[in-house]
Image: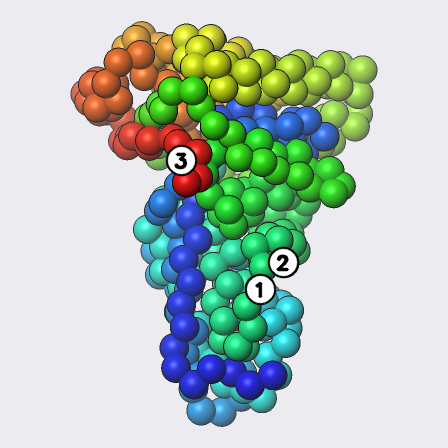
């Protein structure tokens, strides 16, 4: 396949999981929202064979060479065609905001463009899911789906994976609070998988209860019941804590957010460090300011369906 002569680039955004992380790996649904910030991949032809890779923004990783090689192969680009692949991110890495999935989606899109092909979103999501396995072992696909399609989505891992756009009756914001500690998603997911396999009679009902919260949250979002949504988020945090994927630091941030009047708060993403999301009762900037005054780094995200 002929590569395009000029440089090509692609951007994919990160995500926040509103409810359902971890349980989604075990067959339950999740609600996820795409973020504008994420990862940009630029591909430029260069003389000679092979790939030269340069990554900034905390995205340099020993597994990157394998992911780029696989994305090249999936795009059908011959080994003798020389390419420079530049990767840059504007999202905190390894904190539960989906930087790996954004990287995989941007890589797939950029290399497909470099090969002169136009891939459908469904093909991009499928190939990015394969690549994400290099970083996370057995991802559900929720992060890659958010990075591919954006917007506020309902997601089920399947197989086959399914998603559809959620339409909130009222637009709302969440405040993302960074704990300052990083995590390894693959390890957190594998740990819970082992515990669930060892004691299915204990874990299965808890994971099922998370699924029930996600279903109720969908109705709350579609019905504009933000007070209830907040309660469901805080309950979801309690169950994630019961599953052993929270930390004292994340629990303390949740407590701080609730003390500052948030309608609800929970860890987001894999846990074990990373970030918390809080649903403000009033102006998001007021909650963000109060959390900053308590020493937390945070930012607000507006949630709306994909237009
Ligand atoms: C990570 O963002 C979400 C998890 O549910 C893992 C996954 O779904 O692949 C923890």
- Quadrant of the frame with the N terminus: bottom right
Judged left or right of residue 239, residue 304 is left
Q: Residue at x 72, y 26 (%)?
A: 195
* Cβ–Cβ under 8 Å for marks 2 and 1: yes
User: In the image, which disc is placed on residue 181?
Assistant: 3
Instruction: Name the element at disc 3.
Output: loop
Front tag of 1 and 3? 1
Residue 134 x, y percent position in the rendering: 62, 55
Residue appearing at x 38%, y 30% in the figure: 303
Q: Which of marks 2 and 3 is in front?
A: 2
Say the numbered circle drawn on residue 119.
1
**Crowding near the residue tagged with mark 2, few <14, some 14–19, many ≥20 C-alpha atoms within 10 Å:** some
Q: How far separated are the C-alphas under marks 2 and 1? A: 6 Å
Residue 127 spot, x, y in % from top left: 63, 58
Mark closest to the chain's N terminus, 1 or 3: 1
Looking at marks 2 and 3 on the same chain, the residue that comes earlier in the sequence is marked by 2
Residue 202, image quadrant: top right
Q: Mark 2 points at which residue?
A: 123
Report the front residue among 189 and 214. Answer: 214
Q: Look at the picture and state if 177 lies above or below 34.
A: above
Q: CA gap, disc 1 to disc 3?
A: 36 Å
Q: Measured along the vertical axis of the image, is residue 275 above or below residue 111?
A: above
Q: Residue at x 56, y 45 (%)?
A: 145
Q: Where is residue 153 in the image (x, y as percent from the top left)?
A: 53, 34
Q: Is mark 3 within 8 Å of ligand 1?
A: no
Position of residue 206 in the picture relative to residue 8 (left or right): right
């Amino acid at each position: 396949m002929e590569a395009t002569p000029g440089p090509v680039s692609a951007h994919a955004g990160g995500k926040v999981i509103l409810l359902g992380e971890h349980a989604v790996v075990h067959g339950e649904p999740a609600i996820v929202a795409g973020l504008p910030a994420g990862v940009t991949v630029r591909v430029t032809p260069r003389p000679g064979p092979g790939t030269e890779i340069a990554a900034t923004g905390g995205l340099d990783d020993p597994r990157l060479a394998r992911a780029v090689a696989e994305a090249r192969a999936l795009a059908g680009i011959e080994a003798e065609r020389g390419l420079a692949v530049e990767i840059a991110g504007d999202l905190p890495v390894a904190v539960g905001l989906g930087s790996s999935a954004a990287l995989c989606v941007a890589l797939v899109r950029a290399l497909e463009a470099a090969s002169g092909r136009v891939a459908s979103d469904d093909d991009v999501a499928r190939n990015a899911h394969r690549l994400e396995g290099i970083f996370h072992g057995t991802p559900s696909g929720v992060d890659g789906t958010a990075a591919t399609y954006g917007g506020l989505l309902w997601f089920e891992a399947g197989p086959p994976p399914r998603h559809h756009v959620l339409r909130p009756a009222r637009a709302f914001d969440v405040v993302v609070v960074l704990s300052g500690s990083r995590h390894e998603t693959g390890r957190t997911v594998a740990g819970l998988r082992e515990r669930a396999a060892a004691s299915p009679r204990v874990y299965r009902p808890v994971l099922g209860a998370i699924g029930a919260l996600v279903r109720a949250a969908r109705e709350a979002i579609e019905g504009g019941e933000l007070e209830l949504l907040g309660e469901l988020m805080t309950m979801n945090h309690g169950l994630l804590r019961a599953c052993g994927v929270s930390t004292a630091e994340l629990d303390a941030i949740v407590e701080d957010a609730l003390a500052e009047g948030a309608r609800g708060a929970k860890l987001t993403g894999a846990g074990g460090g990373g970030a918390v999301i809080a649903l403000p009762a009033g102006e998001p900037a007021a909650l963000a300011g109060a959390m900053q005054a308590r020493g937390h780094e945070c930012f607000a995200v507006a949630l709306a369906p994909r237009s």
